Amino acid sequence: MTTEPQQFASDNYAGACPEALDAMLAANAGSAVAYGDDGWTQRASDSFRTLFETDAEVFFVFNGTAANSLALASLCQSYHSVICSSAAHVETDECGAPEFFSNGSKLLLAPSADGKLSPEAIRTLAGSRSDIHFPKPRVVTITQPTETGQVYSIAEVRAISAVCRELGLKLHMDGARFAHACAALGCTPAAITWEAGVDVLCFGGTKNGLMIGEAVIFFDRALAEDFDYRCKQAGQLASKMRFLSAPWIGLIESGAWLRNAEHGNACAERLAARVADLPAVRLLFPVQANAVFLIAPDAVLDDLRARGWRFYTFIGGGARFMFAWDADPARVDQLAADIRAACEVRALA
């Protein structure tokens, strides 16, 4: 099989990092008790507790849709509602799974130009109706970083949490690229989660170097009651759980979870810097994590496609480029050179 040139349309294109693979191979050396009652899963859970500096409850699932949907379902009854940004991943990319697994909890959407949710928007939505005919607000969910690549600061998370506490709401964080937010802010994982008032975090592994798998972390253990049953019912209880949990050991204990994110973020900054002087191209959003959104004329984007580049334009019309742990800086430079060349062709046309 021939290897295609590296693409940056999605950080899901990346393979598994060596640290995760090595841990997977180690877990494969012999038998282990099934359904998570094994030493690898216990060690991975303890690794998370050490990383977050708290005695959290940890669960492992196959993908982000399951992580978010089951976490939200555990916080809601069917007559409740979940407040989120109109650009939140749970709204735009989960195919109705949060509503399905919660048996109908409604998503209440706050309009947002940059994908972020503000305390004011939360207060407005939570206070818009209080009668029995309207689904009762119960949870706030934020995507960190957002779908537009923006990062919530510690102060922003704290401000959202303060409103949640005031209004009696729980706070869930969709952290499909959580590691990239930590790398961008230069803070500890604890600082932007439980120390800032987050109740539940879905920590993304697939976009951070794992072959498959996400972790659902309950900082309030009481909220995790019967979550194992939810996982089983939803088809998320792996019989050979060690193959979901062991790669996390390699990722966390080696520090690769942060190095991988730092590299992805740096490659995004690299591309942005190399096209910053092009008059025909501009950034749609500031580059804060591992995403670059470029606004360019259709002729330029068509030229890039003709040169073999893949990218999406489903957010704001900008070409989105995502950089994973394995992004090759030389390939990033080639992308920048091709963007420049495409602009020059358009200028001559």
Image (tube, rainbow, N blue to C red):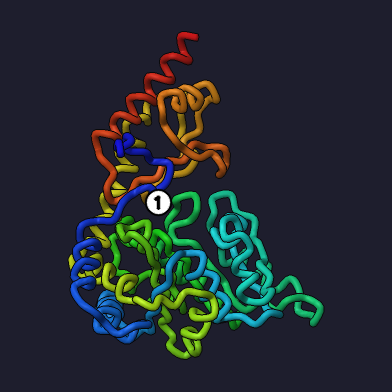
**Residue topped by disc 1:** 12
- With 325 as the anchor, is 193 left or right in this view? right
Quarter of the view holding residue 192: bottom left
Q: Position of residue 298 (x, y in %)?
A: 55, 25
The 10 Å Cα crowd at callout 1, few under 14, some 14 to 19, many 20 or more, is some
Q: Amino acid at mark 1?
A: Asn
Q: Considering only vertical position in the picture, is 9 above or below 186?
A: above
**Quadrant position of the N terminus in the picture:** top left
Q: Position of residue 241 (x, y in %)?
A: 35, 76
* Residue at image coords 36%, 36%: 272
Quarter of the view holding residue 175: bottom left
Q: Position of residue 129 (x, y in %)?
A: 76, 74
Q: Nearer the viewer, residue 71 or 244?
A: 244
Quarter of the view holding residue 214: bottom left
> Is residue 156 at all visible to an observer of this figure?
no
- With 29 as the anchor, is 129 left or right in this view? right
Is label 1 in a helix, a strand or a loop?
Answer: helix
Single out the residue that lies furthest toward the top: 348
> Is residue 252 at all visible to an observer of this figure?
yes
